[in-house]
Amino acid sequence: MISQVAAKTIAITLLCAVTIPLLTLYDRFEPAGPQLLADPAFNNALKSWNARGAAQLAKDESGVATLSLEKNSTSASISQTIKNPGPDRYFTFSGEIKTENISKTGKPSYVARLLFISFGENGEALWALPHRLATLEGSNEWSRYEKTFRIYKMVKKVRAGAWLHKATGRIWVKNLSLRQARERSGYITARYLAMIAWALMALWIAPSFISVKEFRLSSFILALTGACIIGGILMPKEALVDMVSLIDKSLPGIRDYTGSIFSNGGSDNGLSGVKPDFGEIVGAVYSLTHFFFFLLIGLMAFIVKPEIPIPKALGYLVLFSVATETMQLFTAGREFSFDDMLLNLAGVGAALFIYLFIRKITRK
């Protein structure tokens, strides 16, 4: 007869297996408004666009704009700005891009990019918010990209377009589009059903963790660490951005070093003085926290609970890493990421390796 622990483990595994494809493969958004870009087909040349540097219409193709650079010390861009987009809305940005011999000169941002940039009240670029539609280097044939971005309360304007910054080569863009979007009713229903299923699952498995026969500080710290991980994972994107902004303002030295997309007070000067912003750096560091958090909780689990067989403990940790990443599907502004889940699992694997290494040394 199957044990309760095994039954709950199987149930969580099946719930993850159903929730992830259901909410990640579902066509979540649908158009909810008119085209927001003026002259997206470039019928009136580039008069409706904020064109900077070597930006012009393609001579051999209609409805196509080109950006080209021969020196990696300059920039070229075409973009449009939408002011007061309104909070808690979604915008779908799409476009087609082709590149030729794009050669970057160091930093990851020095390539060909389609971007949807959000700006705060003082004109600062909010790099901690999702902003990349496409990032390309080398030579690539025509490809279409589409992504839906959420507008948060601190966003006062958005800018969409194509950029070629401090990278030599040429890009072609066409069929750029920016439209307001909304979640499909079917997706909303599926998400609520999944949330109910997870809530029932939590009520079922909670007694196993709440009932404690004797208090052990080590077990308490392990449980607290797990709770902190879940809390961080379920933190809304907006709260994360507020935290990044607070750190940014508290550490002016770092901000002076990293700079911002618009160096002279956020004015509309194309890409003059562009550097990776502190928020973008924090975003990369935040991804690595997945690895380190699960490295920490993995080590604690192996050390605090030595009575649990290693294969069994490893299975629990793998399941916990997948389940916590799945929970982000229910958090505002967050999304499930296979990359983050792999970082979780890498942290667990590293914890196992370190634990086995330490145990081997201490037993000599």
Image (tube, rainbow, N blue to C red):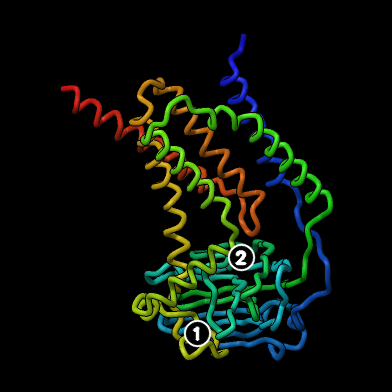
> Which of the two discs, 2 and 1, sits closer to the camera?
1
Name the residue furthest top. Answer: 1
Residue 244 in the image, given as x and y percentages of width and height: 48, 68
Closer to us: 319 or 21:
319
Identified at 67% across, 66% down, the residue is 150
Identified at 47% across, 69% down, the residue is 279
Can you see residue 127? yes
Q: Is residue 122 above or below residue 117?
A: below
Residue 72 in the image, given as x and y percentages of width and height: 41, 79
Q: Is 107 on the left-hand or right-hand side of 55?
A: left
Residue 229 in the image, given as x and y percentages of width and height: 49, 47
Dot 2 amino acid type: Leu
Identified at 74% across, 79% down, the residue is 37
User: Which disc number belongs to residue 262?
Assistant: 1
Q: Residues within 10 Å of mark 2 (few under 14, many from 20)?
A: many
Name the residue furthest left. Answer: 364
Q: Is residue 157 above or below residue 191?
A: below
The image quadrant where one finds the N terminus is top right
Name the residue that disc number 2 marks. 133
Q: Is 28 on the left-hand or right-hand side of 219?
A: right
Q: Earlier in the sequence, mark 2 or mark 1?
A: 2
Q: Secondary structure at mark 2?
A: strand
Identified at 30% across, 32% down, the residue is 355
Dot 1 amino acid type: Phe
**What whole-number distance in Å separates the C-alpha atoms at marks 2 and 1?**
20 Å
Can you see residue 13? no
Residue 163 placement: quadrant: bottom right
Residue 275 in the image, given as x and y percentages of width and height: 43, 77
The image quadrant where one finds the C terminus is top left
